[in-house]
Image: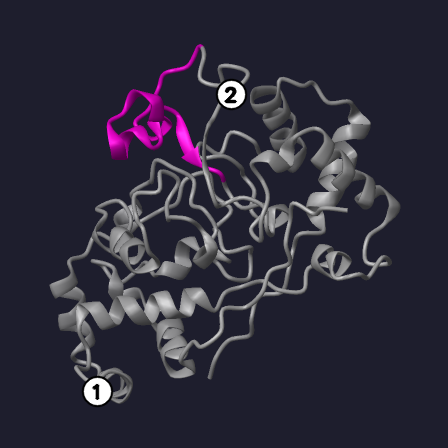
């Protein structure tokens, strides 16, 4: 039987020294203006790569305007951010550092601080011929993020032939997920993350509400009317760990998210049994976060 979903595989060839350096930088609050916020503040690797908040809190208590997506498996996304405005993980890493409601720093400020750390400067010198630079800092963070592939989910074991990995309900949920059309957007290794789609294909999700800039989605990047309310389809990997859901965090539970997706994307009202089965399947997509590097 054709499977629209593929097992996750690690990215090979990553320099372990750069991965470890990137991990250190990912948790380093010196990348923020007031040295209180790190990448890990909004992307907790022990909690699905998110912070569990509707909108993240940045420097000085500033509140963001869009739900933070998971950093886990982000290397396989077709682009980064909900609107796809960053083509690479390196480009993505710059955004929060500069964003005034996230980390609120400048790269010159960050580099100036890190240059005072002799051990860190020495590590950069061993790993990069030109040492500590903005480009190398971003490369190290991106290299670490490329290592965050959550392999060995129960569903991947099932795809590889372990028929005992899933319960009967979970298998049935996967069947409904395919037959109802969920897999038309949520497929591939990430179970999403590889295309853009309008939020509200068969129903107006935004009717009767004040539209925010974040609601405009990819329109903010392209300025094209056809991209209004278009977003990168999120990956469903580890989705059971990443509530709340959607760019506006309007769904607090998986059940609510599945119900809304069926209504606005598929034009379908699910039964309780449908929702229960699909949610059970989605729980099988949680994998294992790679261990910390020394």
Name the residue: 26% across, 32% down.
222
Image location of residue 37, percent across then percent down: 32, 58
Q: Is residue 284 left or right of residue 150?
A: right
Q: Secondary structure at mark 1?
A: helix
The location of residue 75, given as percent across then percent down, is 44, 59
Residue at image point 58% right, 49% down: 188
Q: Which residue is mark 1?
A: 118
Side (left or right) of 50 relative to 173: left
Left or right, 76 with respect to 25, comes to: right
Mark drawn on residue 130: none
Q: Is residue 253 visible?
A: no
Q: Is residue 214 magenta?
A: yes
When the figure is inspected, residue 204 is found, relative to residue 197, above or below; the finding is above
Q: Is residue 76 left or right of residue 89?
A: right
**Disc 2 crowd, CA 10 A, few/some/many (<14, 14-19, 20+):** some
- Give residue 290's position: percent from left, percent from top: 56, 71
Question: Badge 1 local density, few (<14 within 10 Å), some, or many (20+)?
Answer: few
Q: Is residue 293 above or below residue 89?
A: below
- Does residue 204 appear in the picture of this structure? yes
Question: Which residue lies most toward the top here?
Answer: 208
Q: Is residue 141 magenta?
A: no
Q: Residue at x 82, y 61 (%)?
A: 162
Magenta segment boundaries in residue numbering: 208-233
Which structural element holds mark 2? loop
Instruction: Specify which label sits upstream in the sequence, 2 or 1.
Output: 1
Q: Is residue 280 above or below residue 34?
A: above
For label 2, the residue is: 201
């Amino acid at each position: 039987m054709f499977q629209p979903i593929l097992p996750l595989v690690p990215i090979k060839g990553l320099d372990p020294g750069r991965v470890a350096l990137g991990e250190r930088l990912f948790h380093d609050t010196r990348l923020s203006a007031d040295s209180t916020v790190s990448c890990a503040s909004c992307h907790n690797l022990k909690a699905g790569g998110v912070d569990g908040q509707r909108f993240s809190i940045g420097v000085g208590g500033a509140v963001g305007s869009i739900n933070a997506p998971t950093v886990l498996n982000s290397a396989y996304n077709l682009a980064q951010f909900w609107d796809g405005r960053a083509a690479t993980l390196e480009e993505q890493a710059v955004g929060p550092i500069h964003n005034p409601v996230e980390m609120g720093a400048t790269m010159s400020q960050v580099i100036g601080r890190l240059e005072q750390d002799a051990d860190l400067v020495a590590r950069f010198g061993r790993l990069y011929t030109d040492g500590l630079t903005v480009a190398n800092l971003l490369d190290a963070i991106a290299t670490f993020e490329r290592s965050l592939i959550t392999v060995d989910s129960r569903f991947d074991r099932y795809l590889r032939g372990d028929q005992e990995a899933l319960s009967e309900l979970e298998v049935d949920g996967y069947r409904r997920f395919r037959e109802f059309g969920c897999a038309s957007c949520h497929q591939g290794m990430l179970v999403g993350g590889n295309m853009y789609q309008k939020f509200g294909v068969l129903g107006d999700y935004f009717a009767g509400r004040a539209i925010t800039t974040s609601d405009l989605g990819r329109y903010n990047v392209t300025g094209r009317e056809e991209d209004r309310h278009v977003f990168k389809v999120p990956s469903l990997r580890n989705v059971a760990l990443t509530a709340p859901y959607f760019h506006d965090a309007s769904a607090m539970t998986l059940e609510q998210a599945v119900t809304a997706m069926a209504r606005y994307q598929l034009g379908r009202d699910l039964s309780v049994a449908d929702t229960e089965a699909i949610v059970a399947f989605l729980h099988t997509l949680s994998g294992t976060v790679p261990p910390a590097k020394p």
